[in-house]
Amino acid sequence: MTDLIPFIIQRMNYFVFILLMLMGMYGVFYKKNYMKKIIGLNILQTAIILFFVSIGAKQDATLPILRHGGVRGVVNPGDYINPLPHVLMLTAIVVAVATLGVALAMVIKIYKDFSSMEEEEILLQLARKPAPDNKKSKCQ
């Protein structure tokens, strides 16, 4: 039991990421309001980005910038931070912002058309709507 507490404290960030991911998944899968689904998706994306940024960090490491002719001999890669997770997460942030913008635009359009953001109300309105008549030709 005494070994469990330091183990949890050392890995607290992973527990926080798991909690954030579960909160986001709960919002996406179980909420019926489209705005709440978007908020859950944003929380999920943020948790994943924070996870990848945290695994890219190293204690007592420096940036991987070498001066020309400044290093003699063998370079130890363990002394440097891996920049790849950070670069990929910058791309993920751009994708997350674009996804959020498109999702919000879709919710605005849905609200204008159905006067609701609740999934069940919108499905009921769609079920009541008559099917379009495809027999008429528009070219006449």
Image: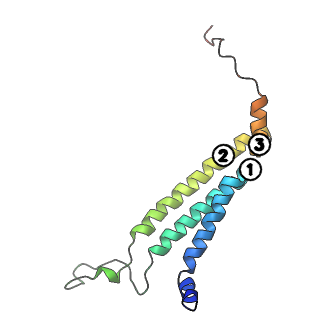
Q: Earlier in the sequence, mark 3 or mark 1?
A: 1
Side of 108 where 140 appears, left or right: left
Which quadrant holds residue 12?
Answer: bottom right
Identify residue for label 1: 32
For residue 43, which numbered disc appears in the image?
A: none
Q: Which residue is mark 2?
A: 105
* Mark 3 residue type: Glu
- What residue did someone put label 3 on? 120
Looking at the image, residue 52 lies above or below residue 124: below
The first of marks 3 and 2 along the sequence is: 2
Q: Would you say the residues marked 3 and 2 are in contact, meaning their CB atoms lie under 8 Å apart?
A: no
How packed mark 1 is, by other alpha carbons closer than 10 Å (few <14, some 14-19, many 20 or more), is some
> Quadrant location of the N terminus?
bottom right
Amino acid at circle 1? Lys
Question: Which quarter of the figure has residue 122?
Answer: top right
Q: Position of residue 76 (x, y in %)?
A: 27, 82
Contact (CB < 8 A) between labels 2 and 1? no
Q: Secondary structure at mark 1?
A: loop
Residue at position x 63%, y 13% in the image: 138
Q: Is residue 120 above or below residue 71?
A: above
Q: Where residue 42 appears, x then y in whole percent?
A: 62, 59
Question: The residue under label 2 is which amino acid type?
Answer: Ala
Q: Is residue 82 visible?
A: yes
**Are the residues flagged by discs 3 and 1 in contact, CB closer than 8 Å?**
yes
CA neighbours of label 3 inside 10 A, class few (<14), some (14 to 19), many (20+): few
Q: Secondary structure at mark 3?
A: helix
In-front residue for pair 2/104: 2
- Looking at the image, is mark 3 or mark 2 nearer the viewer? 3
Residue at (44, 85) in percent of width and height = 59
Give the alpha-carbon distance from disc 3 to disc 2, as whole Å.
20 Å
